Image: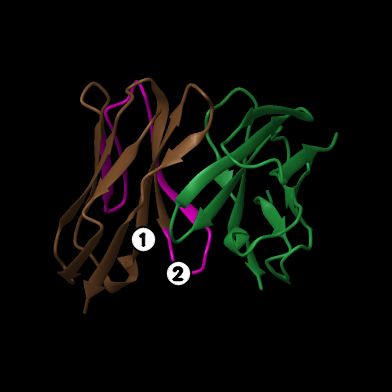
Chain colours: A brown, B green
Amino acid sequence: KQEVTQIPAALSVPEGENLVLNCSFTDSAIYNLQWFRQDPGKGLTSLLLIQSSQREQTSGRLNASLDKSSGRSTLYIAASQPGDSATYLCAVLGSARQLTFGSGTQLTVLP
Amino acid sequence: KAGVTQTPRYLIKTRGQQVTLSCSPISGHRSVSWYQQTPGQGLQFLFEYFSETQRNKGNFPGRFSGRQFSNSRSEMNVSTLELGDSALYLCASGPPETNIQYFGAGTRLSVL
């Protein structure tokens, strides 16, 4: 059974700092890995999707990497802003065609 | 192109009642998946429908059921509601033969 773990559970940083969020998964047989953002009480906003054959994806200040063999992904956020404050979720799509989510990292960027 | 639309956005029910949630996928998407999000269990997969057939099911009791119509719209039904069913229910749709899922804003169900 696929398990996804995100570390840390919560993170508080001053504005302008670069930061890394970590995600690990137990079964490397995945189709893709996605990073989502969720604001309080809201749905999921897809940030980056990495197909299993890819190593990384970039969008603006965000960069996500995938090491399928070791079961790890990182989300790098450059020059963080207060508007980046949210919960960040990592999810993998496995052979059962269902997304398995981590429990998220709650990020607070202090002005 | 309109995104995934879920209705209603908010719902309040009492224990023992039943509820139906609706999801309209992005035009052209034939796959619809449902997820439940609670503070204690996080996001969990409920089921997936493709071309009106349930293709995959998560580990939820039989009180949770769903269906998909010929226009790919999907409904999820929960019977005999329990307090623990209070959650944000998210729907996602995906285009044919891809592994990408796009999420709706969710329906927040409160069971009193």
Which quarter of the figure is the N terminus of chain A placed in? top left
Q: Which residue is mark 1?
A: A87
Q: Which residues are magenta?
A: A38-65
In the image, A97: left or right of A7? right
Q: Is residue B101 visible?
A: yes
Name the quadrant containing residue A32.
top left
Give, as a three-letter code, the residue at label 2. Pro
Residue for point 55% across, 39% down: B101
Q: Secondary structure at mark 2?
A: loop
Magenta stretch prevailing secondary structure:
strand
In the image, B95: left or right of A55? right
Give, as a three-letter code, the residue at label 1. Thr
Residue for point 78% across, 39% down: B67
Depth order, front residue of B109/A70: B109
Q: Which residue is mark 2?
A: A40
Name the quadrant containing residue A48.
top left
Which chain does the numbered disc 1 sit on? A
